[in-house]
Amino acid sequence: MTSSPGKAPRCVALVGPYLSGKTTLLESMLHVTGAIPRKGTVKDGTSVGDGSAEARQRQMSVEVSAAGTEFLGDRWSILDCPGSIEFAQEMRNALMAVDAAVVVCEPAIEKAS
C-alpha cells in the first residue's frame, strides 16, 4: 500500500531524558517499517539518528535528527530529539513543529525486598 501523493506526512517527535532509548526506538521503527535493512546502534556508531561526527563521538544525540518512513499507507517524519539538558532547546524547537510527541522513558524497576 502506498500513500496518497497529496497527503502531507505525519510528523512525530521522540522526546525523553538522556539514555532513555529514543535513538534505539527510531532504529527499530525504521527497521520494522522497511525503511532500513538492519538496525544500527548508538554504541557502534551505526544509527541513523546520530549521524553527525560529534554525536557518534559522544555516543549521544546533540541535535534533532530527522528520518522518514511509510506505515499503513501514511508517510511519517520522525524527529529524534536529544535528551541531554544541554540540548533541551533543540527539543523545544522540534515540539513546535510536530503533530505529536512520543515520550520515551526508562521503566522503574523495583527491587525485591
Image (cartoon, grey):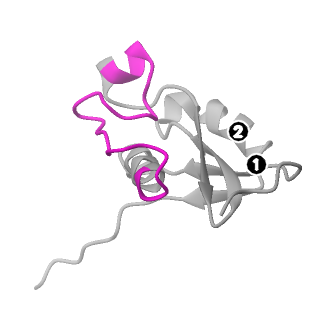
The circle drawn on residue 94 is 2
Q: Residue 88 appears at what percent x and percent y?
A: 59, 35
Q: Is residue 47 magenta?
A: yes
Frontmost residue, 74 versus 53: 74
The circle drawn on residue 98 is 1
Residue placed furthest toward the top:
53
| 56 to 48, vertically: above or below | above
Q: Are marks 2 and 1 in contact (CB under 8 Å)?
A: yes
Frontmost residue, 93 versus 99: 99
The alpha-carbon separation of the residues under discs 2 and 1 comes to: 7 Å
Frontmost residue, 18 versus 56: 56
Which residue is at 76% across, 50% downward? 9
Q: Could you tell me the amino acid type at mark 1?
A: Val
What span is colored magenta in the figure?
Answer: 31-56
Residue placed furthest toward the right:
6
Which residue is at 56% across, 50% downward? 14
Residue placed furthest toward the front:
1
Q: Residue 23 appears at what percent x and percent y?
A: 42, 44
